[in-house]
Image (tube, rainbow, N blue to C red):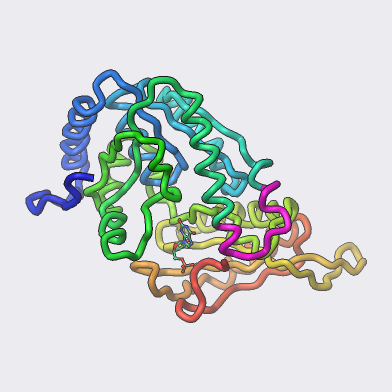
Amino acid sequence: MADNKRPETMERITTAQLAQAFIDEQVKAVQEQVGDKKVLLALSGGVDSSVVAALLIRAIGQQLVCVHVNHGLLRKGEPEQVIRVFRDQMNANLVYVDAADRFLGLLEGVTDPETKRKIIGGEFIKVFAEEAAKQEGIQFLAQGTIYPDILESEQGIKAHHNVGGLPEELNFELVEPVKFLYKDEVRVVGSALGLPDNMVYRQPFPGPGLGVRCPGAITRDRLEAVRESDAILREEFEKNGLQGKVWQYFTVVPDFKSTGIRDGERCFEWPVIVRAVNTRDAISASIEEIPYELLNHITDRIVHEVKGVNRVLYDLTPKPVATIEYE
Ligand code: XMP
């Protein structure tokens, strides 16, 4: 990459007006860079890739090909939202790849956390490269690189930015319109581009997705328990004004069962662990104090609505010693 330093004169984008000026400038720059050629983008539905997609749709419309890979480890409703927002509302050229069986097949019986991560990252690149090969005349690869990614790469904190380091051998020229923006600026730009709030202000979500919240070997039934309990937690946090106030919150379903009683019978089912943390930089994190009444209500919903679950636990451990995620 040629120039990787944010210009010192660049004003922090804090208002819709500044966002609009940035959008106008980038639309022009992208049009000049790309001309009438085609651009490929891995669209995860996360803030950064979504903002890049919306920006490029404005700049080059159907010349942008968005590829959304569903690795089977996304949260409830995520692939549907990507399709609704980008294909239905923004008329994007969107390729949706349902690769859930492929990923879950490869992950079967794999217990080691790093091996799980490697399988997910490696397979993602493979699926994406296959889709790229099906497209004709692609010359550019768009990426949702943001300024902290560049800074962290330079400091050696992150080996690569974003989705798992897309294949350099694909030999595309990069289009990175938000590479000088900080996260808060990306959000302001996303809102100005008309993306929904729950996409623009969503909590961080790891690349390996729910895979790191289903510790040990992933099974479809336990993964479903993670997905359903996560959906209940998110719904209740949103209803009770905690969305946007708590930095990251999710559920984990560990691989053990304990005794419970259901309809007068003993049952052996999983626990769901709820984790809600606040942090500035994800390097350390504190535990959010959730109102007891709300915790009770969430517990009641999870044990009655999520199949195979008979307990709910609340994780009280800050980072350090615990990391935010479980794997
Ligand atoms: P930890 O668990 O290390 O997480 O305290 C810190 C932040 O990073 C996110 N995280 C990941 N993000 N790929 C990602 O893209 C990963 O493999 C990964 N692991 C953790 C985590 O969600 C938290 O926000």
Near-viewer residue (257 or 316): 257
Q: Quadrant of residue 28?
A: top left
Q: Residue at x 22, y 25 (%)?
A: 31
Q: Residue at x 57, y 47 (%)?
A: 74
Q: Can you name the residue that lies furthest to the right here?
A: 265
In this rendering, is residue 59 above or below 81? above
Classify the position of the N terminus by image quarter: top left
Magenta span contains residue 110: yes
Counting every numbered tag in the picture gives 0
105 left or right of 47?
right
Q: x, y percentage for residue 227?
A: 64, 52
Which SS type dominates the magenta stretch?
helix
Q: Residue at x 33, y 31 (%)?
A: 140
Q: Quadrant of residue 308?
A: bottom right
Q: Can you name the residue that lies furthest to the left here?
A: 9
Q: x, y percentage for residue 34?
A: 26, 26
Near-viewer residue (11 or 178): 178
In this rendering, is residue 94 above or below 279? above
Near-viewer residue (290 or 129): 129
Q: Quadrant of residue 274?
A: bottom right
Q: x, y percentage for residue 21?
A: 16, 36
Q: Can you name the residue that lies furthest to the top here?
A: 36
In this rendering, is residue 21 above or below 158? above
Q: Residue at x 55, y 38 (%)?
A: 127
Magenta span contains residue 78: no
Near-viewer residue (145 or 284): 145
Q: x, y percentage for residue 267?
A: 87, 66
305 left or right of 176?
right
- Extent of the magenta region: 104-117
Classify the position of the C terminus by image quarter: bottom right
Q: Can you name the residue that lies furthest to the front here?
A: 169
